[in-house]
Image: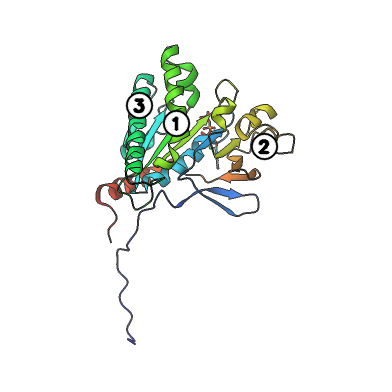
């Protein structure tokens, strides 16, 4: 055994993350880390303005940006919330429904292509060793595209395409993370909500809007995002695949954290990781 100690290298190997790794969302009320695999799932977030949705979206997008097996498709009806990640997004859609629908049609085609390939090789789902990236499709604010902008036909087309991608995307390696500050039945009908395996309710103004995110009945059982105090920004109830809602606080990335991450992700995505 050698008695000499090797000089510490001045550069350390840093591996990228993978979309198949759990994503760090925050900590729960007992101080445990909330790390959730989101591949093969869809995640819906809702809550009143300023309740913490964009902060949590940033955590998920940060994971995607640092994952070299992730293709990021960002839809930002407000343009500035996800805009900081624009340089490392593969697709960035601002407040333009024509563009949004065009991109969703492309996503649908890619999904169909992947299913055709899976069927050809007699497989059920995309896995980590497949030569296709996981597609992380993040939409902030769904209602902008589904009820506010464009013509009725465009809004309807948006919802039809989105519903299809949410319903069929999982096994094809397409994750949809959607946020809305308007948790109402016209924006998130039950049939759409139920397609999301994960739901995260930040502070809501009524029990019924909390139930629209989580699902009917939880408020009566004592799990209502209405009970989150207005000053408790970033606190939400996370319902994961049929469990019980878990109260948690999302992790927080400051703007300067995000600038640093974007720069790092840009290098990582250009070169792959290297020592
Ligand atoms: N986890 C957190 N830790 C610390 N501060 C937070 C956290 N989450 C939210 N905040 C604070 O609350 C503010 C509003 O959060 P955020 O922008 O995420 O709300 P939002 O729900 O996306 O609002 P809107 O619907 O209007 O876009 C943040 O700028 C930040 O100051």
The spot of residue 22 in percent (x, y) is 48, 51
Secondary structure state at the residue bearing disc 2: loop
- Depth check, mark 2 against mark 3: the one in front is 3
Identify residue for label 3: 105
As drawn, 138 above or below 123: above
Res. 151 mark: none
Which image quadrant for residue 182?
A: top right
CA–CA distance in space, label 1 to label 3 = 15 Å
Label 1: how many residues lie within 10 Å, few (<14), some (14-19) or many (20+)?
many
As drawn, 121 above or below 230: below
Identify residue for label 1: 139
Do labels 1 and 3 touch, CB within 8 Å? Answer: no
CA–CA distance in space, label 2 to label 1 = 24 Å
Q: Quadrant of the C terminus?
A: bottom left
Which image quadrant for residue 101?
A: top left
The answer to which of 85 and 246 lies nearer the viewer is 246
First-in-chain label (2 vs 1): 1
Q: Quadrant of the N terminus?
A: bottom left
Identify residue for label 2: 228
**Which colouring convention does the figure follow?**
rainbow
Total marks drawn?
Answer: 3
Do labels 2 and 1 touch, CB within 8 Å? Answer: no
Label 2: how many residues lie within 10 Å, few (<14), some (14-19) or many (20+)?
many
What residue is drawn where x is 54% and y is 34%?
A: 45
Secondary structure state at the residue bearing disc 1: strand
What residue is drawn where x is 33% and y is 31%?
A: 109
The spot of residue 12 in percent (x, y) is 32, 63
Secondary structure state at the residue bearing disc 3: helix
The answer to which of 82 and 21 lies nearer the viewer is 21
């Amino acid at each position: 055994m050698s008695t000499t100690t090797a000089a510490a290298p001045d550069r350390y190997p840093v591996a990228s993350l993978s979309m198949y790794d759990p994503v760090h969302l925050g900590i729960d009320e007992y101080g445990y880390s909330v790390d959730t695999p989101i591949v093969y799932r869809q995640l819906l977030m809702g809550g009143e303005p300023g309740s913490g949705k964009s902060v949590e979206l940033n955590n998920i997008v940060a994971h995607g940006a640092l994952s070299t097996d992730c293709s990021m498709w960002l839809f930002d009806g407000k343009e500035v919330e996800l805009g900081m990640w624009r340089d490392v997004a593969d697709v960035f859609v601002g407040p333009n429904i024509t563009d949004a629908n065009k991109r969703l049609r492309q996503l649908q085609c890619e999904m169909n292509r992947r299913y055709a390939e899976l069927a050809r090789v007699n497989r059920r789902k995309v896995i980590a060793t497949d030569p296709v990236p996981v597609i992380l499709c993040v939409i902030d604010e769904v209602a902008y595209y589904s009820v506010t902008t464009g013509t009725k036909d465009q809004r309807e087309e948006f919802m039809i395409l989105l519903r299809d991608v949410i319903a069929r995307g999982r096994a094809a390696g397409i994750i949809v993370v959607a946020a809305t500050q308007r948790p109402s039945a016209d924006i998130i009908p039950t049939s759409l909500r139920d397609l999301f395996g994960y739901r995260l309710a930040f502070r809501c103004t009524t029990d019924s809007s909390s139930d629209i995110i989580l699902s009917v009945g939880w408020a009566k059982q004592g799990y209502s995002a209405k009970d989150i105090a207005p000053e408790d920004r970033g606190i939400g109830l996370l319902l994961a695949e049929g469990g019980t809602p878990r109260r948690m606080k999302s992790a927080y990335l400051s703007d300067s954290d995000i600038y640093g991450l974007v720069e790092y992700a840009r290098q990582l995505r250009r070169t792959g990781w290297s020592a």
